[in-house]
Image (tube, helix red, strand yellow):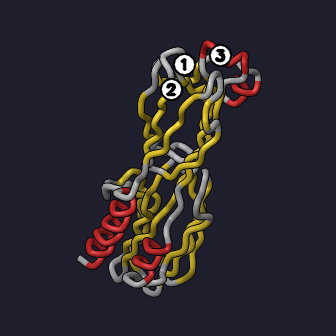
Amino acid sequence: MKTRIILSLILAVLFSSLGNAKKVTISNSGNTYTPDEITVELGDTVVFNISSYHNAVEVSQSTWDANGTEPNGGFDIDFGGGELVLETPGTFYYVCTPHASLGMKGIITVTSTITSSEQSTVESNSDAVLSVYPNPVSDLMTLSFNVNRQTRVSINILDITGRTTQNLIDSDYEPGIYTEIVNLEHLRAGRYFVYYRSRYESTVWPLLLVK
């Protein structure tokens, strides 16, 4: 029951922060995006208010550097504009297909951090039996946990809805301090939670996965 309360509090804080998402507009001045570089938070909406002669197609960085137009399978804003919400942190490169050779291209950087309010929610409602680092993490994550009495320990990765996306540990442990390294490279970038549970203790920690 205690763990459910903790997770509910964290999710409430998270969705409250996403509710404050803003809109950022990109227009065009001739054959130039204005602004051509922006930084937004996860959940923000990017509005392309551009003329019917221009589009915005996501490309790889190498294609962007070469003023190329080969799409990389990412977003594709039609001629005349549209709206875009990027669901993962990272740097996104895009070009105007007819005018990339003229240098009409832009960059969107999407950032996401674990806020102090999320962190304090966890710290004030959980036992200090688990540490997770680095956080944010890109692939390899280290778990360090303290077992005070012989017990079975399970550690899982939960998505922001509370659904288990990866089972990390489910074993019996004698008293002691343990360190495990886990690979998260197959998970998509985004926000997750690390859920530690034993017979005697449980805790939930926010985790940010970046690529």
Q: List x then y, in percent, for residue 117.
A: 44, 74
How far apart are the two marked residues, 3 and 2, measured between alpha carbons?
A: 13 Å
Describe the element under mark 2 as helix, strand or loop: loop
Quadrant of the image for the N terminus?
A: bottom left
Q: Which residue is mark 1?
A: 54
Query: Which is more foreground, mark 3 or mark 2?
Result: 2
Q: Is residue 200 left or right of residue 53?
A: left
Within-10-Å neighbours for mark 3: few <14, some 14–19, many 20+: some
In the image, is residue 84 above or below residue 174?
Answer: above
**Rendered residue at 34%/57% (across/down):** 19
> Going from the N terminus, do you reach mark 3 or mark 2 first?
2
> Going from the N terminus, do you reach mark 3 or mark 1 first?
1
Q: Quadrant of residue 66?
A: top right
Query: From this viewpoint, which residue is outermost toward the bottom?
Result: 148
Name which residue type carries label 2: Ile
Q: Which residue is mark 3?
A: 99
Q: Which mark is residue 50?
A: 2
Describe the element under mark 3 as helix, strand or loop: helix
Q: Are marks 2 and 1 in contact (CB under 8 Å)?
A: yes
Query: From this viewpoint, which residue is outermost toward the right?
Result: 66
**Rendered residue at 40%/77% (across/down):** 121
